[in-house]
Amino acid sequence: MKNLSAFLIILLLISAGAALADNADPPESVVTEAVEELEVRRAIDLEASDTPEDEGGSVSLTWLMETEGVTPDSLGVMRSDPFGGEEHITTLPVGTVMYRDQSANNGTEYNYWVVSYLGGTIEACSDRAVAISSAQWIYRGRIGMLIILFLIMAVIIYYIEIGKRGKELFIREIAGLTAVDDAVGRATEMGKPVLFIPGIMDMDNIQTIASIVILGRVARKTAEYGSPLLVPTCRSVVMSVAQEIVKEGYLQAGRSDAYNKENIQYLTDDQFGYAAGVDGIMVREKPAAIFLLGCFYAESLILAETGRSVGAIQIAGTAMPSQIPFFVAACDYTLIGEELFAASAYLSREPKLLGSLKGQDAGKLFFLILIIVGVIAASIGDFWSPMKSVAEFLRNLVTVN
């Protein structure tokens, strides 16, 4: 009996050992062989094409990833040119399915392929795709603005043509420009000079250019009336241009002998040094008329208050929003913003300039109406879907993608 019990115990121990052996992990060599049987996932369905509606130099790549296999560490985009040179463009994280090559040369045929990295080595490679980069003439995302531009151009040409035919083009009266003749006449009656200040910026500033245009008109009037014209400048180039403009004005008035080059002076490039120099001229010469037209900054109120203290009639103009309140407070007339730029058309009455000005005003009116209609359509569109469609159309018309 004892022998039978010992036999059963030994049999149970052998059975338990066999069961434990079945549940144990397989040998490492077996696991490695199983892994090696699975291939690394690669990119498939690779497509390469010229990036649409761009200026060239770009190729767009898209692909998919295999769903079975070992996940790679990263992806690499490779490229070769017709001369046989191969280069690695970039490394991308796993999961990326598109890339845009911004370093392509227009007209060159490139071969692209995507490689899969695992452990720092290339383990899989996609098929190759060919593409050639080129520039496009039309960008469809701006067709709406192109149409609007052509419409405004047509309106400008229309106004120019009717102006050439002799039709009077109405422009509202600008008080500051209408008062130019009165200001110069007042200086002549008092026997005092006219002071013209063209701002503190150089000739590359559009406000300085607009100021110099008005200076030509003032120079002709001072030549006709026989009043001295003083033009202190802050830039040497502005001084040279002002001298030529004033000289031309005196020639047109038939008073070239009255032109005095020394009255157009260069003071200094320093902002407040220039302001101090101009204030000194005001106090010494006591001009009867002062023109402050151009680009001004913190010195604007210093100049305007000094001019007011000597009793001069002052006509100011600038496109600097922060300085306009000071001119309005201290000067008799102020050209606000675009009035300064409209001065050349207003004073010369040249059909081309007037037509351009009228065309620009028509364009502004068009955009104003477009904004109002768009706001109304967007507001009503929350309750009535057809108006929402109108709002979307107007938004797409003026949106630059």
Image (cartoon, helix red, strand yellow):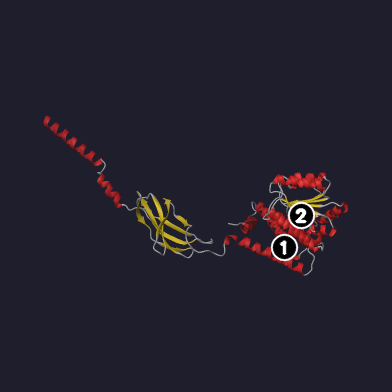
What kind of element bears circle 2?
helix
Residue 159 as seen in the image, left or right of residue 184: left
What kind of element bears circle 1?
helix
Q: Which residue is at the front of the view, 400 or 354?
A: 354
Residue 290 percent across, percent down from the top left: 80, 50
- Eyeballing the image, is 235 above or below 302? below
Residue 280 percent across, percent down from the top left: 77, 45
Mark identifier at residue 216: none
Tag 1 and tag 2, C-beta contact below 8 Å = no
CA gap, disc 1 and disc 2: 37 Å
In the picture of the structure, the residue carrying the numbered disc 1 is 356
Q: Which residue is at the front of the view, 389 or 244?
A: 244
Q: Quadrant of residue 143?
A: bottom right
In the picture of the structure, the residue carrying the numbered disc 2 is 262
Quarter in which the C terminus is drawn: bottom right
Q: Which residue is at the front of the view, 387 or 89?
A: 89
